[in-house]
Amino acid sequence: MNTQKGMPWTDAYLLGHARMDDTHREFVSAVDRMLTCADEEFPAAMRAFIEHVEAHFAEEKALMEATDFPSTSCHVDDHDAVYKSALEVEPLVVAGNIEIGRKFAEALSSWFPSHADYLDSALSHWVVKRSTGGKPVVLRRNLVVER
């Protein structure tokens, strides 16, 4: 088993939009798995991550387009860069270079918090404001969920 530090879920990632929060829990879980799984499990974890982000990013893009989100282009560009990188790393992982896959997962664990804080929180605020007229309500417990 790999002994690297994982990426546990924390309420700091909550945005106040239930579907986005659920999808982000799945994202964090997928990255955590890449960071903590055994080397022989890494290619499958990488593939599962790619399948997750295909759906995750498409869902957010559809939400942005459906609500005329003003920063759609910037947000989609950020997603596209992550997805493109994942597709570039996967063949290297399949060829046996697990280390580059782990470095990619570490980069994701650094990328996600700021992406969620800035781009995703703006989207959450936009969608909730358009649908309810108010801001999202977020209750954070300041807890890290242990696996």
Image (cartoon, helix red, strand yellow):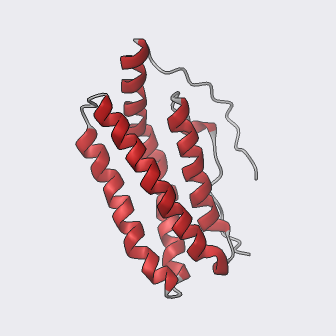
Toward the viewer: 60 or 79? 60
Does residue 111 appear in this view? no
For image coordinates 56% across by 34% down, the residue present is 14
* In the image, residue 9 above or below residue 11: below
Instruction: Name the residue at the top extreme.
Output: 133
For image coordinates 31% across by 31% down, the residue present is 66
For image coordinates 34% across by 42% down, the residue present is 61
* Percent of width and height locating residue 28: 58, 52
* In the image, residue 98 above or below residue 137: below
Quadrant holding the N terminus: bottom right
* Percent of width and height locating residue 20: 50, 37
Does residue 95 appear in this view? yes
Toward the viewer: 18 or 111? 18
* In the image, residue 105 above or below residue 2: above
> Which corner quadrant of the image does residue 119 belong to?
top left
Q: How many marks?
A: 0
* Percent of width and height locating residue 127: 39, 25
> Which corner quadrant of the image does residue 30 belong to?
bottom right
**In-image side of 62 versus 137 (left or right):** left
* Percent of width and height locating residue 142: 67, 34
Instruction: Name the residue at the bottom extreme.
Output: 95
* In the image, residue 94 above or below residue 26: below
